[in-house]
Image (cartoon, grey):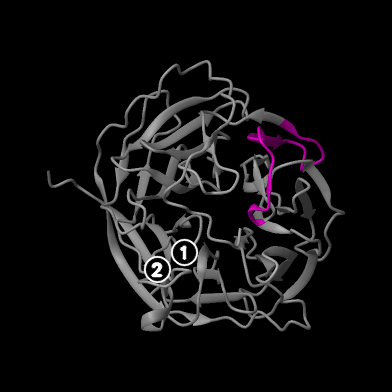
Amino acid sequence: MHKLKISTSVVGIALAAIALMSACASVPPAPRAASLAAAQRVEHIDVVGREPMLVEHPNGALFVAGYGEPRPTLWKSVDDGASWSRVDVGTEAQGAIGNSDVDLAVASDGTLYFASMLYDRTANEGRQIAMGVSGDAGASWRWTTLSKNRFDDRPWVDVAPDGAAHVIWNDGSGVAYTVSRDRGATWTPTVRIHDRGGSSHLAVGPANEIAVRVTPLSASGNKYDAGIDLIAVSTDGGASWRKHPAPGERDWSPDFMSDATPRWVEPLAWDADGRLYSLWTDKKGVRLAQSEDRGEHWRMWTLAETSTPAFFPYLVARGRGELAATWFTASNNDLHDLQWHAARVEGAGSDVQPPARVSAPQSLESRRSRQKGGPPFNDTGGEYLALAFLRDGSLAVVTPIQNPAEQRMGFMWWRFEERPRSD
């Protein structure tokens, strides 16, 4: 979603309680474990890169995409994140159109996918979803317009082990879906996964399963469908979908002007054994759920307890129950104490609550001007902080740099490693 949706004085709409999972009547606390420490921080000052996304190419190159410029913006590093250069993704005439939400995905054969949304800042609504595809690690691009409808919003792309590239987005009339099985040369006609709700997240599993998170808010916040809070799962390449209530309970606000927990992206992830994970936050902590039967039943844990409200989480998974997550915390109305956190979990595939290795709280250089003047306030720079497992075993996070007063725009590249606790 393009607009800043976080409001720090806010109350909410409590959605109907979702069916509780058979394995869990309460959410147990997370045990202590080793800590997660920042081993690398690289600042790249260039142009605005709001809500950045990242992937690692099979050849070792790293890519970061962000939005805020008139055209899609992509950076590349060939030295493990030590330095970055902007990638020429093509011209508007070639179809490289977009100034808002982005996503990246890469196939095992190196095919790179770059989703980009076009947003009308005057009308405050989305206009288009485009997909760029590169088969040569970003040297050249082919662009396809996937949708050109009023209210087009929040595209996601993920690639299955069989090479199929799955894409979702929303437009106020439900969640749209298309797939390419020929490295982006052609795309299937758009179909609807659900006729209401927003495209909150997309994840593809090890047996080509697809999971889609559908939530009440869509169309850049212009549409709210009360009661829509589900996970749709396909096991036949998107031909059919089974829909299940999302695990846990959440408060939602239709206008972001209540004290409900700020929400937009409700992330999903699959591990290598086909377990599906869902992550969400509330005023007391970060919650994790795991399903071994593709969303039919869930067990729930507390990933982290927080003394201030947690919001805007993100989640990735690999291997057998190896997870990583990010989230924000803040407590006052002006977000002066805005911080973000990263965590790594191993052994989430077992029945026992796995320990979470949590980083120290980190700050964000992201400022936003007040509409009626006064000093700028801290801003999240988007609705999540993307992260990824790297081939060397470390964890990467990319955070936006938005400081117009100091003429500092770009992003910060972080790499985290595990270290023993000192306490």
Outermost residue toward the front? 372
Q: Which residue is mark 2?
A: 366
Q: Picture quarter containing residue 356?
A: top left
Q: Please give the name of the residue rendered at 28% of the width and 60% of the height, measured from the top-left corner.
A: 38
Assess whether mark 2 and mark 1 are in contact (beta carbons under 8 angstroms): yes
Q: Is residue 236 magenta?
A: yes
**211 to 326, vertically: above or below:** above
| Residue 221 in view here | yes
Residue range highlighted in magenta: 220-242
Task: In this rendered view, identify the residue nearer to me: 369 or 385.
Answer: 369
Which is more toward the observer, 104 or 213?
213
User: What amino acid type is highlighted by mark number 1?
Assistant: Gly
Identified at 49% across, 82% down, the residue is 85
Q: Quadrant of the N terminus?
A: bottom right
Q: Which mark is residue 381?
A: 1
Decide: few, some or many residues near mark 2? Use Cα within 10 Å; few <14, some 14-19, many ≥20. Answer: many
**What type is the residue that disc 2 sits on?**
Ser
Whole-percent x and y of residue 74? 57, 75
Q: Earlier in the sequence, mark 1 or mark 2?
A: 2
Queried whether the magenta region covers residue 250, the answer comes back as no
Q: Which mark is residue 54?
A: none
